[in-house]
Structures are given as structure tokens and as C-alpha cells.
Amino acid sequence: MITSVINLSDLNGSNGFVINGIDRGDGSGISVSSAGDVNGDGFDDVIIGAPFADTNGYSYGESYVVFGSSSGFDSSFELSSLDGSNGFVMNGIDSFDNSGRSVSSAGDVNGDGFDDVIIGAPDAYTNGNWAAGESYVVFGSSSGFDPSLELSSLDGRNGFVMNGIDRGDSSGWSVSSAGDVNSDGIDDLIIGAYHADTNSQTYAGESYVVFGSSSGFDPSLNLSDLDGSNGFVMNGINSYERSGRSVSSAGDINGDGFDDVIIGADLAEVNGQTYAGASYVVFGSNSGFDPSFELSSLDGSNGFVINGIDSLDFSGRSVSSAGDFNGDGLGDVIIGATDATNGNDTAGKSYVVFGSSGGFDPSFELSSLDGRNGFVINGIDSYDDSGRSVSSAGDVNGDGFDDLIIGAIGGDPNGQSYAGESYVVFGSSSGFDPSFELSSLDGSNGFVINGIDSGDYSGWSVSSAGDVNGDGIDDLIIGASGASPNGNSSAGESYVVFGFSTNTTPNEINGTSGRDNLTGTDGNDVITGLQSRDTLTGGGGDDIFRYTALVDAGDIIRDFEVGSDKIDLAGVLDSVGFAGVDPIASGYVGFRDRGANTLLTVDPDGSTGSGSPRSFILVQGVSSNLLNNSENFIF
């Protein structure tokens, strides 16, 4: 199936669904993630943060787990309908905590076989310290959940809280599973505190790895108590670099069998370039850790720094594992640089750095990416801010390679300013050029996902959703915190987009030289009516209606689906000698309204020739302004 564009407005339950926020200003979708399988039913679940929700007071924040299922989904799901059987809400504790500012799967942190979740509340008042921040782990269970869970009720048996250290640290701004950093067989956590003052360096930032344990947890853990046996702190280097702005597992990037972590410092000065940004990879190990680790001590043997390129790029604003994108068996990473310029101001760039078992130097320059060690992914238009959120997408197209998803909140799809766009780039073992243009996505190498309305900011947060619908292919989740469902301004929306196999061979359905009535299957079909006046119905799936010559004229297409079906005119255009680039602009292909239908015309010599357009096929139920788009055709 070749799909180059998905409009989030077209999600209908079969290809994905929208999850609507509840109240005005909640900002649901500001953070989204797979939750793993929290309830142990065999289907991956998702978690959504709404840090400005006011259930227990102003901006307490809420986080929502929506359970996966193989029973199907409606086109929309209301977070207000969570009842314990389909998911549950986790309520923040105090006003202005902003719990849900960052949410993530925690992996299985207590070793009970169920995936857990982690929630950041960076503005929580902790141990008498304003905005020191708190992070909460809620344990998964097969025993069921009530419709709501109060984070204040965490008691060590159902989860626990991790308390930030000093006033204004904002611990929990970014939270993530760390994988298994110390190789004890239990997943660990990483928490960013990007406003922490370290070694007398203001806002140098700190990040904390908290080790998982099967021995149980107390109701609370003070991050100041990390001593190397239960976790450790990673200290930023220079004032105002904000290390911990984004944190994530890096997978096993050096192939030593231990999971590594990556930490973004988006305001770091690099090579004299102010706010170029830097990202730090710290290697996992089973040799033990000291209570604290200085990021300045990275020397290639214990990790390395990845340096941004130009001033004001803000590389490291978002960092993530990229899975095994190039299929070499090693973990890769992706780094977003939202304000990088590629001829278009702040179009944004994202950088993929490939893992290697051959070792790393103490520092790695993103400017050195050459296709063999990684590559840069260039945003499209000025002010797109591509790279605002980056993540592994899992294997969305079922080809065996991990894919990537990149959010661009400034994208203006379909004329909607800041509706946002998200881009999926397919993994491959066939090699990569040093740079890749997101404008080149064509369905074979990835696809674009368009937001809906102006100011939605879709792509603010993007993530793999795991396999939510149980079809064996990974799905995606995209947050649009500015969306206004049900008339509630900025309540926010989140979209689950189901993965699909690109390896499925379509059904070939061929007509005769006489009149045929051809109907496709529920899958992907290629329908060729041949001569005479045929009636074609694609049915379900993504269908191609193929024409090879002018004598194929006179057909009626009854159920053309804009955005999924295509009309193949390549053979027709070859037969009339078209050798240009755009047959629509050249007048070879035209469109005329026929009520609610469109008559497609073909002019054998285009607009500059002496011939006239000929009626070719009638496309029912689609207006000319919708059909008149090259994305609906194969030329």
C-alpha cells in the first residue's frame, strides 16, 4: 500500500481514531507516548498528558491511559468516557503542579511482568521547595483499575513518587524509560531537571537514572538519595545549557549489550555557536555507577557528546531512541533541532546518528554526518519547527525495520496555519544519503500526516503507540495540544494512526473489451477496466484505478476515496507522448464539475496544442477542487 499523505481529519476508526480532551485549556496531547501493556491483556496502551487540567484545582494536571483492543474503535474517543474498563485517569495532587507535562512508558520497573507508566509534574512543590518537581510511577496490573487514580494515593504497592531536590529544578520536565541501564534484567527510569543548578552552574541541568527493582519501593524516593546502588545523577556542564530538557533511552548504541541513555541540552554553546545545542549519550554498564556522573567526563569509553552545528539551532530540544533504523542490529538515536535553517528560517532539522560497535570518539559533530554514520532530515518550510518532537515510530509499515516520526508544529497543511504536520520516515538497510528532504516523502520512503485546524499544533508530541489494535503492526500517537474538540478551546486532541503493511501485494482485477461492472475487495486492489464503458467500485483498502490508453474512456468510478485511492494515468500519458513533469499544469489532465461529481478530461496535446480536452472518466461523489491534486494520481 502506497500512502504518501494521511489527513488526521480522515481517521475513521479503521485507520485510526482521535482522542478528545475534556475541558477548555486542558492542553491534552502536550505529551503522548506508548504506555506499553499496562493491564496485561496483550494489547499496547497509550498515555496522554493534560498538564493544565483543573480537576482538583488550577493546573493540577491529569494523565490518561487508554487501553488497546482488537475489538475495534470508533472514529473518536472521549477522555471523559474513561471508566476503568477502557482506561483510566490519573489526577495530579496540587494546584500548578502541571502533572502530565511529560508522560511515558516506564517499562516494567518493578519486575512483575506488567508495564508501568511515569508522569512528570515539573512545577510540584516538594519538601518545601517550590517547583522542585515530582515524577510518579504507576504500576501496571491485571487486577483492574478504577476510573480514576489519585497520584496522592501512591503507597509503594501501586506506585511511588520521586521527589526533586532544589527550588526551581523542574524535575519531571522530561521523563522516560531508560531501558535496562545496569543490566539487572529490570527496566530503569530517566528524569530530566533542566533548571537544576549543578556545580555552581545556573541551569546547567541534571538528569537522574533511577534503577528498577523487584524488591519493592517505598511510597516516595528523594532524588537526593541516589547513591549509585539505586540510581545516579548526571550533572550538566555549563550555566544555562539546560541539560535534561529532553531525556530518553538510547537503546544499545554501542553494541555492548547494555541499554544507554541520551540527554538533550538545547541551549549549550558548542564550538563558539551560542545555543547550537548538544546531546549526551551515557553508556550503560554492569560495573556499577558512582552516585554522580559528570557529563564533562565523557571520553568515548563511557559515552560521548553530540554537538550541534549553528547558533540558535537548539539541537537536543527533543531526543529519542530511533530503534534500529538501518537494520544493522545496533540502536540508533534521533535529535531534533527545531530552529535550524536550511535556506528556510527555522524549518528545523532532525539528525539520525547510527549506532556502532567500533567505538566513539569523546565528541561527535552533527556536521560530519555523511550517510554512513547517520544523516540529517531537513524540514520543509520556514517556521515549521520540524524536530519539535522526535521518536522511534516502531515498525509502522511492517517491513522489519524501525521507522521514525518527526513533529513540525508550524506546518500549514491545507492552508491551515500551525495546524501542524508529522512525518514518518521509513527505516531501511539500503543505505542513506547524507541528507534527506521531508518534502520528498512519497509513500515508498515514508509519509506525511497533516493536522486539521489552524492553531492545533499537531506534532507537539509524537511517539510510537506500540500495537494498539493487535494487528501485528506498530501504530503511532500524535498530540495536538491546541485543538478544540467539542467546542472546548485548547482542550487538546491526540490521534492514534494505525500502522499498515507496505508489503501487501494488491489484488489485480481486470475487465474485458466489453462493458464490465468491476468491484474490488476489502483489501488493496488494482482495477483495470480496459475498453468500453465500465463501472468500477474499489471497496475497502487503498485502490488504484488503472488506465492504459485513450480508448479506455467512458468509465464511472463510484467510490473514489481522496487520500487513499489513486487513478493511474501513466499509460495514457505515455500513449500521447507526454514527457513533462506536471500533466495537470500542462493541461493534459483537466477537471469539470458535474454536480457532486467530477468529469476528468484528457487533452492529447495539452493546453499548448491545437486539440481539445476529451471526456475520459466520471468520478462520482468527489468535487473537482478535491480531485484536482497530483496526490490522487499516478502519472
Image (spheres, rainbow, N blue to C red):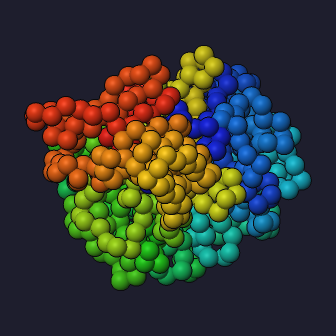
Note whether 594 is above or below 378 in the view shown: above
The residue shown at (47%, 37%) is 556
Q: Is residue 420 visible?
A: no
- Image vertical order of residue 528 relative to residue 133, above or below: below
- Relative image position of residue 44 (x, y in whole percent): 69, 55
Q: Viewer-proximal residue, 463 or 498?
A: 498
**Which residue in the rendered view is the most extreme toward the top?**
487
The quadrant holding residue 89 is top right
Compared across the picture, whether 592 is left or right of 422 comes to left
Pick the front one: 511 or 324: 511
What residue do we see at 79% from left, 42% from top? 86
| Left-right relation of 184 to 5 | right
Is any part of residue 494 visible from this angle?
yes
Image spot of residue 102 (x, y percent): 57, 43
Q: Position of residue 197 (x, y in %)?
A: 44, 46
Q: Residue at x 19, y 31 (%)?
A: 612
Left or right for 364, reference 163: left
